[in-house]
Image (cartoon, grey):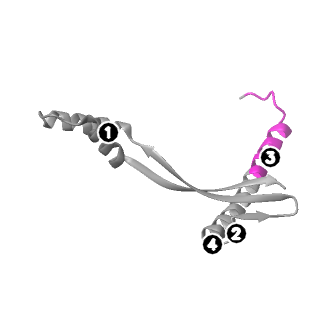
Amino acid sequence: MNNDLKLTSVDTLGSLLAQIKDLTDQADAIKDAIKDSASAGGAKVVEGAIFKATYSETNRSSVDYKKILAALTVLLQEQNKEIDANKLVAGLVASNTNTTAVFTVKVTSR
């Protein structure tokens, strides 16, 4: 075990990390309250005396290209006839794309 650091330094670090965790939990709870209110039809911009929070909704899509490659390989092995590659790839991308809603709260100074 390396005792080059004084115990007080390690204790300070542990205390700071615990405080950061507590503050992050508090911030997340406030963000969740803003998200819940805004997604239920409330204000999308909330202004305080010093800061402003803006709620936004976006969709994030991700394509599973490994699944597409596997499906394409199977299709090409099963069929020996002419295939419209553009149509095939477009269909595979569409059927292997996952879209999820993303809700964020950004805080800026006023």
Rounded to the nearest angstrom, the CA distance separating label 1 from label 2 is 41 Å
**Are the residues tagged 2 and 4 within 8 Å (C-beta)?**
no
Q: Is residue 7 magenta?
A: yes
Q: Which mark is residue 41?
A: 4
Give the residue number, with chain letter if any, for mark 1: 68
- Main secondary structure of the magenta stretch: helix
Question: Dot 1, crowdedness within 10 Å: few (<14), some or many (≥20)?
Answer: some
Tell me the kind of residue under disc 2: Ala
Callout 4: SS: loop
N-terminal of the pair, mark 1 or mark 4, is 4
Question: Dot 4, crowdedness within 10 Å: few (<14), some or many (≥20)?
Answer: few
Callout 1: SS: helix
Left-right relation of 99 to 65: right
N-terminal of the pair, mark 3 or mark 4, is 3
In this rendering, the label closer to the viewer, 1 or 2:
2
Tell me the kind of residue under disc 3: Leu
